[in-house]
Image (spheres, rainbow, N blue to C red):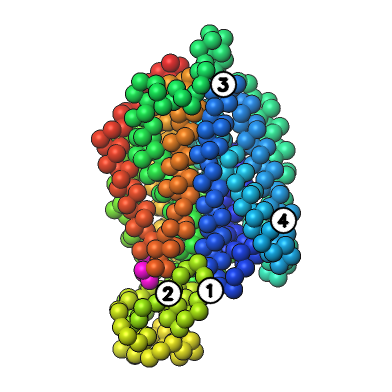
């Protein structure tokens, strides 16, 4: 339950990133505001490794229980505080500074959360069931996402759009205070891990877990495998299945936000039990082969699944892209995705990006666009819009033309691929490291992998899309990281399911 609430706190920002960008990073350019907001989302991930070092140290020195009592308090308090923040309109530049500060605290807290929860459960689990028992932690992450969706959708249902923008967005953040109280109550009832208690009584706990994590024989290699093979790969799959699909549905497929969130909720609910199933399966067939199978299937299905999603959500856009391709003739252009477009060519690129239109660039002396067979010289927003509409490019997805099962199936299969790679990860990482330095050793690579490879996925993938003009090009980031993880695990990851974790 504590993990559900903690991830609720963290996902909440990601789901409301577009609105928060307008409220806290006001520039007048929606693309820039979204990118700055996603950058603030990534800041939380940037500080997760530091939180892993700090709380990993204390988790190996003073115990698992008290360490993650601190992490949940820090996370819940920082999240609730976001609900009290002034926006850019009232506080100016101080608004984003305060927001970034609270995102930093969230990242530090989350850096100490996962390792403590995973170790605590694994060290209580009976032999042969560690994958099944710890898989509930991964399922709890999905539970946090679903709880977040439920709260946001409920607020949107009972609060008008104008009021939600004005003050209603604060309600989901303030609800963290209730969840924080429940989480603290639950965790105060827990006893300490039996493995840690045995080490404490025997006097075998590490004097300096950080140093020992890097100097213990063979441990540095395990840290590298955990980082580049396990954490990086499964994390980009997970965040692609959650935020990648959400931003794609809203930005490229032009699905309204509430409807996109509903598709995400249904798809996630259908696939969420698979986290526990694959954790259970890893106890029987092994962790490594299941992880490699998940990586392989992700590389095989990634692009087809997003094409299926687009075809179900906005078939008119898919048809127009195929039958009336857009080619833009560009002179040298100083377009930056992080600033308000000032030149004619920058405004043209911004216009196409905002509408989710894929296009091909051609170098030229003068700006022009070709939509199918129609060519327009220079940038005239109204003329370009008329040409796109005439070619079948819709501004929003047509609800009557949607094929719901395609969207839900694509989302559910993506979440299923995440479950296949993520379901057994806690067991893998716990089994990979010695008990006396386990909290630190598993937390550092896990949170560097999730913090940097995963946390920066939304902003990197969106940046790639904006720079290339291709709606699907951001998926190459996921593909490349998963390919790297596959190679690392295939060569260097040992099978760990039968290891004695009391040592």
Which residue sits at x=69%, y=40%?
180
Residue 334 marker? 2
Which dot, 2 or 4, sits closer to the camera? 2
* Percent coordinates x, y for residue 130 in the rendering: 45, 27
Which residue sits at x=61%, y=28%?
67
Secondary-structure class at tag 3: helix
Mark 1 or 2 closer to N-term?
2
In the rendered structure, which segment of residues is drawn in magenta?
468-472
Mark 4 or 1 closer to N-term?
4
Mark 1 or 3 closer to N-term?
3
Mark 2 or 3 closer to N-term?
3
Which dot, 4 or 1, sits closer to the camera? 1
Which residue sits at x=33%, y=53%?
479
Which dot, 1 or 2, sits closer to the camera? 2
Q: Read off the residue under disc 3.
A: 61
Q: Residue furthest top?
A: 202
Classify 351 as above or below 426. below
Q: Is residue 218 left or right of residue 501?
A: left
Mark 4 or 3 closer to N-term?
3
Q: In which quarter of the image is the C terminus?
A: top left
Q: Read off the residue under disc 1.
A: 340
* Percent coordinates x, y for residue 90 in the rendering: 74, 65
* Percent coordinates x, y for residue 311 in the rendering: 39, 69
- Give neighbour class at mark 3: few <14, some 14-19, many 20+ (Cα, 10 Å): many
| Viewer-proximal residue among 208 and 152 | 208
Classify 125 as above or below 382. above
- Give neighbour class at mark 2: few <14, some 14-19, many 20+ (Cα, 10 Å): few
Which dot, 1 or 3, sits closer to the camera? 1
Which residue sits at x=30%, y=48%?
483
Query: Mark 4 to mark 1: distance in Å?
Result: 25 Å
């Amino acid at each position: 339950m504590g993990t559900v609430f903690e991830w609720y706190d963290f996902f909440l920002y990601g789901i409301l990133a577009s609105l928060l960008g307008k409220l806290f990073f006001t520039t007048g350019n929606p693309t820039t505001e979204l990118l700055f907001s996603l950058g603030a989302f990534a800041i939380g991930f940037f500080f997760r490794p530091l939180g892993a070092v700090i709380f990993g140290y204390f988790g190996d020195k003073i115990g698992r229980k008290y360490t993650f009592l601190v992490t949940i308090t820090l996370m819940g308090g920082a999240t609730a505080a976001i609900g009290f923040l002034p926006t850019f309109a009232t506080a100016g530049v101080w608004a984003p500074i305060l927001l970034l500060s609270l995102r930093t605290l969230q990242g530090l807290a989350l850096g100490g959360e996962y390792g403590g929860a995973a170790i605590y459960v694994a060290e209580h689990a009976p032999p042969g069931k560690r994958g099944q028992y710890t898989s509930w932690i991964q399922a709890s992450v999905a539970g946090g996402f679903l709880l977040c969706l439920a709260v946001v959708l409920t607020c949107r249902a009972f609060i008008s759009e104008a009021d939600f923008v004005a003050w209603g967005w604060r309600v989901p953040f303030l609800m963290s205070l209730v969840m924080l109280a429940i989480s603290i109550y639950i965790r105060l009832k827990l006893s300490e891990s039996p493995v840690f208690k045995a080490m404490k009584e025997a006097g075998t706990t590490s004097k300096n877990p950080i140093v020992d994590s890097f100097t213990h024989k063979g441990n540095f290699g395990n840290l590298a495998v955990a980082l580049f093979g396990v954490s990086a790969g499964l994390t980009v799959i997970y965040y692609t299945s959650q935020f990648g699909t959400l931003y794609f549905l809203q930005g490229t497929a032009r699905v309204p936000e509430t409807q996109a969130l509903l598709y995400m909720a249904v798809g996630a609910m259908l696939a969420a039990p698979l986290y526990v199933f694959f954790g259970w399966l890893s106890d029987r067939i092994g962790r490594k082969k299941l992880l490699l199978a998940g990586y392989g299937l992700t590389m095989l299905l990634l692009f087809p699944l997003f094409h299926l999603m687009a075809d179900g959500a906005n078939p008119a856009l898919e048809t127009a892209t195929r039958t009336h391709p857009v080619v833009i003739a560009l002179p040298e252009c100083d377009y930056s995705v992080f600033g308000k477009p000032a030149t004619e060519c920058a405004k043209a690129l911004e216009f196409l990006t905002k509408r989710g239109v894929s296009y091909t660039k051609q170098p030229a002396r003068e700006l022009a666009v070709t939509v199918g067979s129609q060519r327009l010289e220079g940038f005239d927003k109204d003329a370009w819009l008329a040409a796109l509409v005439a070619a079948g490019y819709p501004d929003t997805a047509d609800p009557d033309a949607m094929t719901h099962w395609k969207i839900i199936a694509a989302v559910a299969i993506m979440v299923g691929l995440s479950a296949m790679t993520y379901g057994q990860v806690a067991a893998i990482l716990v089994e990979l490291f010695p008990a006396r330095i386990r909290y630190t050793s598993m937390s550092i690579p896990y949170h560097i992998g999730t913090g940097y490879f995963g946390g920066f996925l939304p902003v990197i993938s969106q940046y790639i899309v904006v720079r290339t003009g291709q709606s699907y090009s951001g998926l190459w980031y996921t593909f490349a990281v998963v390919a790297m993880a596959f190679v690392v695990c295939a060569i260097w990851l040992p099978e760990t399911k039968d290891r004695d974790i009391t040592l």
